[in-house]
Image (cartoon, helix red, strand yellow):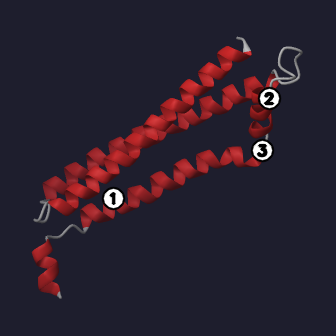
Amino acid sequence: MTAFEMIEVLLAFQNRLDVQWGVFITVHLALFGGIIYIDRPLRRSEKAATMLIYLGFAAINYLVSMDLASAIHAVQLDIAATAQLPCCDQNQLIQRISERVNDPTASITQAVLLGSHGIMLVLVLLSIFYDRSLNEMKNDE
């Protein structure tokens, strides 16, 4: 594979990961919006179904995102391996990718994915579990 082809693959994986983040954010906005919009408490069966569907979504989104992050890292390592070759030793983009892949902050991606999915999992499950109608909340005051 040429350096150009590897950079194309890298961009394709990064774009796909951006799409996964977009889906992650959109689903959470829709879910929280739906919980707020429905002015009656969810029934137990609705809560169970919502939790089950959400757990499936969250697991799939997390696994796909982690796989993409690993693929991105692998391509970055392949690109970095070409940094000293005569074809690429003057290419600033390849030199930059080579420097970034060896940077300790590169491993932060997996921690961010795990942390963000974990935090949102807790927030969503608590929101569903403790869902109450607006009238109930007003009566409690």
- In space, the residues marked 2 and 3 are separated at their CA atoms by 17 Å
Q: Is residue 118 left or right of residue 1?
A: left
Q: Indicate which disc, 2 or 3, sits on the residue closer to the N terminus.
A: 2
Residue most extreme to the top: 1
Mark 1 surroundings within 10 Å by alpha-carbon count, few (fewer than 14), some (14 through 19), many (20 or more)? some
Which mark is first along the chain, 2 or 1?
2
Q: Position of residue 30 (x, y in %)?
A: 27, 50
Inter-mark Cα distance, 1 to 2: 44 Å
Give the left or right position of residue 119, taking residue 92 as reference: left
User: Residue 52: x, y in percent?
Assistant: 27, 47
Q: Which residue is mark 1?
A: 124
Residue at point 77%, 44% (across, down):
103
Q: Secondary structure at mark 3?
A: loop
| Front: mark 3 or 1 | 3
Disc 2 element: helix
Q: Secondary structure at mark 1?
A: helix
Q: Quadrant of the N terminus?
A: top right
Residue that appears at 14% across and 54% down: 45
Residue denoted by label 3:
103
Q: Which of these two is toward me, 140 or 50? A: 140
Task: Report the amino acid beneath label 2.
Answer: Gln
Tell me, for residue 92, which label it has, or none.
2
Does residue 23 lie above or below 117 as drawn? above
Q: Residue 108's spot in the image, x, y percent?
A: 65, 49
> Looking at the image, is 130 positioned above or below residue 117?
below
Name the residue nearer the viewer: 125 or 95.
95
* Inter-mark Cα distance, 3 to 1: 34 Å
Mark 3 or mark 1: which comes first in sequence?
A: 3
Residue 28: x %, y % from top left: 34, 51
